Amino acid sequence: MSRWAEACWQRNPAPMARIKIEWQNNVGRWQAYQTHNNERDAFRSAQNRARSTGQRHRLVDEDGRLLDLIDP
């Protein structure tokens, strides 16, 4: 590994987390919608879509853990 790559790795050791946005259909099943790298951006997208569609949305991390639940 080069010195530059090693220095970057030491400053930013954790890889970016992937945040999934899912929405709940009319029978209660969760459907995939989008994936984001930024949690704030994912929340904003899910909140805007929940308002426009009137359906419940949730944010889930890569391991399937619930991060947030957004009601319209």
Image (cartoon, helix red, strand yellow):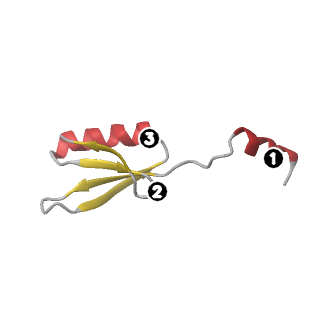
Q: Earlier in the sequence, mark 1 or mark 2?
A: 1
User: Comparing marks 3 and 2, which lies closer to the viewer?
Assistant: 2
Q: Residue at x 18, y 59 (%)?
A: 25
Q: Is residue 72 above or below residue 17?
A: above
Task: Tell me where residue 49 sits by quadrant.
Answer: top left
Q: Amino acid at mark 1?
A: Glu
Q: Cα distance, mark 1 to mark 3?
A: 26 Å
Mark 1, Cα crowd under 10 Å, few <14 / some 14-19 / many 20+, is: few
Q: Amino acid at mark 2?
A: Glu
Mark 3, Cα crowd under 10 Å, few <14 / some 14-19 / many 20+, is: some
Task: Tell me where residue 54 sits by quadrant.
Answer: top left
Residue that numbered label 1 is attached to? 6
Q: Residue at x 25, y 54 (%)?
A: 23
Instruction: Judge left or right: residue 6 versus residue 68.
Output: right
Q: Marks 1 and 3: CB-CB under 8 Å?
A: no
Q: Marks 3 and 2: CB-CB under 8 Å?
A: no
The quarter in which the C terminus is drawn is: top left
- What numbered label is drawn on residue 39? 3
Q: Cα distance, mark 1 to mark 2?
A: 26 Å
- What numbered label is drawn on residue 62? 2
Q: Earlier in the sequence, mark 1 or mark 3?
A: 1
Task: Tell me the element at label 1.
Answer: helix
Residue 46 is situated, as x and y percent measured from the top left of the image, at 30, 43
